[in-house]
Amino acid sequence: QLQVVESGGGLVQPGGSLSLSCAVSGFTPDYLSMGWFRQAPGKEREGVVCLSTNDGTTYYGDSVKGRFTISRDDAKATVYLHMSSLNPEDTAVYYCAADREECYPNSWYYEGLWDDWGPGTQVTVSS
């Protein structure tokens, strides 16, 4: 069974940068995409980015385009989320997820379609 664990969250000042890691164990070729979501207090879970593992296609949420970047290190079975120009609106619990379908532009952000989730890591942007 796939296991997903996030790390790297913490407190960062506005305008700062932070990188999150998602360690994956039990990954098989059945899994075709990895993604990051986030959930702020009192809000619904929001899709941040989806990465198709077969061809590298990525889709980003509008609120993070140009500021966040997803990358992967297959040797370490780890996916990263590099965040820059952070602002208080980025404060949330960030979740890593895996799915057996590749990323589709009009559906990747629906959390109900994702198969496996990590427990999340808190990111707080505050001065």
Image: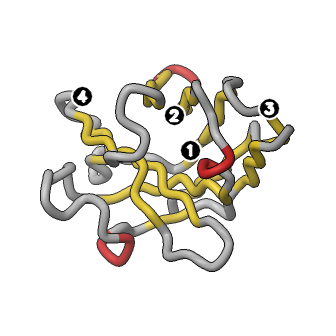
Q: How many marks?
A: 4
What's the mark number on residue 89? none
- The residue carrying mark 1 is 24
Instruction: Locate residue 18 relative to residue 51 in the image: left or right.
Output: right
Residue sitting at x 55%, y 58%:
38
Could you classify mark 2 by the number of other residues whose Cα lies within 10 Å: few (under 14), some (14-19), or many (20 or more)? many
Residue 50, percent from left and from top: 33, 45
Real-space CA distance between mark 1 and mark 2, rounded to the nearest whole angstrom: 8 Å
What's the mark number on residue 13? 3
Cβ–Cβ under 8 Å for marks 1 and 2 = yes
- Viewer-nearest residue: 71 or 53: 71
At mark 4, the secondary structure is loop
- The residue carrying mark 4 is 56
Amino acid tagged 2: Val
Residue sitting at x 63%, y 79%:
42
Which of pointers 4 and 3 lies earlier in the amino acid sequence? 3
Q: Quadrant of residue 112?
A: bottom left
Of badges 2 and 3, nearer the viewer stands 3
37 w.r.t. 67: above or below? below
Which of pointers 4 and 2 lies earlier in the amino acid sequence? 4
Cβ–Cβ under 8 Å for marks 2 and 3 = no
Amino acid tagged 3: Gln
Which of pointers 3 and 1 lies earlier in the amino acid sequence? 3
